[in-house]
Image (cartoon, helix red, strand yellow):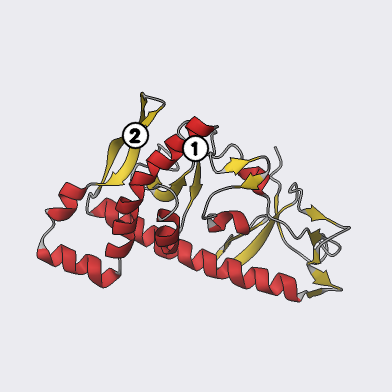
């Protein structure tokens, strides 16, 4: 199957425009959405922040995510084409674009566009090119995505450090829905016991790296699982 993600270029995409809206519909069946470490404070004030393994093949690779539902393909912050949560993960705002390293030139980034996105058309919205030149709209989107990519690298370093220090463990969250207990199993969470048992030297290293804030934001967000239960009960 051909990927809908294509490298953006002035030849193939000279007439492309992007509609002035967010693709909220694309989150409808997403139980989790990826987060940057920089989002933990805001996201953690609105929803549970957890860690997931993108692939079971490499258990050392973990990624932070916003937990949006209590079962697969459930997003309780989506309703009738609208986002009803108090925080929208940044990844949604970047659609239909992505920024990735150029193959063979890892230090050079290239911008991809999802050609199958309903936001991509040639009739309405912001133009990507003016002749063969990038439009101001495109330049701003590229700058934003470049910053996002840089934050992804910082987030990866944060996660790698948590794995290195063995601070992430699979745990279970239990919520109650209309008197019935529902368990969320296999969530990767920071183990508070292990965190508290770290040496003074390791704690100092966490503080120096700026990791304590995100860790506490993550732990403080977990009570929002009860918000998910409330949303499910009201659905």
Check the image and report above or below for 85 versus 28: below
Check the image and report above or below for 226 versus 6: above
Q: Quadrant of the C terminus?
A: top right
Q: Quadrant of residue 214?
A: bottom left
Q: Which one is in front, 26 or 117? A: 26
Left or right of 164 in this view: 4:
right
Give the number of the disc on residue 69: none
Left or right of 30 in this view: 45:
left
Whether label 2 touches label 1, CB < 8 Å: no
Question: Where is mark 2, residue-wise?
Answer: 186
Q: Which residue is at 22% across, 49% downward?
A: 166
Q: Quadrant of residue 215?
A: bottom left
Q: Is residue 72 visible?
A: no
Q: Position of residue 223 (x, y in %)?
A: 34, 45
Q: Position of residue 51 (x, y in %)?
A: 38, 46
Check the image and report above or below for 37 versus 64: below
Q: Is residue 43 visible?
A: yes
Q: Residue furthest top?
A: 180
Q: Position of residue 74 (x, y in %)?
A: 54, 34
The Cα–Cα distance between marks 2 and 1, rounded to whole angstroms, is 22 Å
Q: Which residue is at 24% across, 69% downward?
A: 207
Q: Quadrant of the N terminus?
A: top right
**Mark 2 or 1, which is nearer the eye?**
1
Q: Which residue is at 76% across, 48% downward?
A: 118
Q: Residues within 10 Å of mark 2 (few under 14, many from 20)?
A: few
Compare marks 2 and 1 and give the one earlier in the sequence.
2
Q: Which one is in front, 38 or 132? A: 38
Give the number of the disc on residue 231: 1
Left or right of 189 in this view: 21:
right
């Amino acid at each position: 199957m051909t990927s809908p993600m294509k490298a953006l270029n002035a030849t193939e995409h000279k007439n492309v425009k992007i509609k002035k809206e967010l693709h909220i519909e694309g989150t409808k069946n997403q139980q989790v959405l990826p987060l940057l470490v920089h989002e933990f404070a805001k996201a953690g004030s609105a929803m549970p922040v957890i860690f997931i393994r993108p692939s079971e093949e490499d258990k050392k690779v973990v990624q932070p995510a916003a937990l949006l539902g209590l079962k697969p393909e459930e997003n309780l912050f989506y309703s009738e084409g609208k986002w009803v949560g108090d925080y929208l993960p940044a990844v949604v705002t970047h659609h239909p674009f992505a920024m990735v390293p150029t193959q063979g030139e890892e230090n050079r980034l290239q911008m991809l566009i999802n050609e199958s996105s309903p936001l991509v058309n040639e009739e309405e919205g912001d133009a990507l090119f003016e002749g063969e030149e990038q439009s101001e709209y495109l330049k701003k989107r590229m700058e934003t995505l470049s910053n996002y990519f840089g934050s992804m690298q910082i987030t990866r370093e944060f996660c790698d450090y948590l794995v290195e220090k063995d601070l992430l463990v699979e745990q279970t969250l239990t919520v109650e829905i209309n008197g019935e207990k529902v368990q969320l199993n296999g969530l990767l969470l920071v183990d508070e016991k292990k965190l508290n048992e770290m040496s003074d030297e390791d704690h100092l290293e966490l503080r120096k790296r700026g990791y304590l804030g995100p860790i506490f934001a993550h732990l403080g967000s977990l009570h929002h699982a009860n918000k998910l239960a409330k949303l499910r009960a009201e659905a």
